Amino acid sequence: MRFQLRMMRFSQRLALILCVACALGGPLNAQRQVGVSKVSLDLGTYTVWLGMPETDALSGFQRAGYKVIGKPSDPAWPLRFVVSDRSTYSVAFRDGKLIFADRAWASSASDELGTVISALASLASHDAHSCTIIYAPLNNPDNSAERVFIDCGERSVLLAKSKISGFGNAMTITERIGRLY
């Protein structure tokens, strides 16, 4: 019961922050910078960017001491996992180029709101604009999730609260670049 109450309060605060940010035209509607810049994401100590050659990314992960798990057999689902000592990241390549990467923002039960604010601040600091907020719940007999995507084109944040049979409840906050499809 205590967890449900805490998550309900967290959800209410998050909704208020998102509404205020969108209504006031705050940092999520920042002006686009002049010039072309790479859409990049720091995966621990290594930075990747959309369009990065797969060979460069894989050798960079190796130099950083990361392990890459999986070579997709299905081109329609090209996801791989990059494992460091502290985190696991997801990356995907298509036609030899990086098309997607994500990193989870660490969250503690005592500062969930602070973690959400940090993820949104990162989104805003990368010139996010014209963002769309998408609510996409998942429900099936063994799993359920309340998901909110803050989609700003090639950069997005995913906020999710899930319940997985046998594993319990989890909250994830993920910053992403690119798309899997």
Image (cartoon, helix red, strand yellow):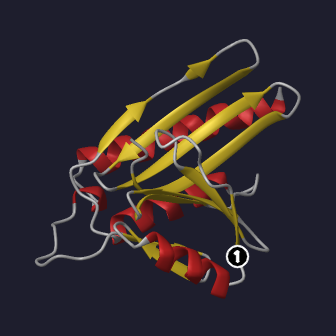
- Residue 121: x and y in percent read 43, 65
Q: Is residue 10 above or below residue 97?
A: above
**How packed is label 1: few (under 14 Cα within 10 Å), some, or many (20 or more)?**
many
Using residue 103 as the reference point, say whether residue 157 is left or right of it: left
Residue farthest to the front, as pictured: 73
The answer to whether residue 151 is above or below residue 122 is: above
Instruction: Return the x and y of residue 180 as percentages of the image width and height.
Output: 43, 45
* Residue furthest right in the image: 166
| Residue 174 in the image: above or below residue 51 | above
Query: What residue appears at the point 21 percent right and 50 percent down from the top-left corner?
Result: 130
Image quadrant for the N terminus? top right
- Classify the position of the C terminus by image quarter: top left
Asked whether, in this view, residue 167 is left or right of residue 121, the answer is right
What residue is drawn where x is 53% and y is 24%? 137
Q: Residue 162: x and y, percent?
A: 68, 32
Q: Nearer the viewer, residue 160 or 22?
A: 160
Residue found farthest to the bottom? 63
- Please, is residue 177 above or below residue 162 in the view? below
| For residue 75, side relative to residue 85 (left or right) | left
Quarter of the image holding residue 99? Answer: bottom left
List x then y, in percent, for residue 40.
39, 72
Q: Is residue 12 left or right of residue 109?
A: left
The quadrant holding residue 146 is top right
Which residue appears at 28% of the width and 51% of the height?
Answer: 153
- Nearer-the-camera pick, 135 or 113: 135
Q: Amino acid at mark 1?
A: Tyr
Q: Residue at label 1?
A: 66
Nearest to the observer: residue 44 or residue 93: 93
Quarter location, residue 44: bottom right
Residue furthest out toward the top: 141
In this view, the residue in front, 180 or 138, is: 180
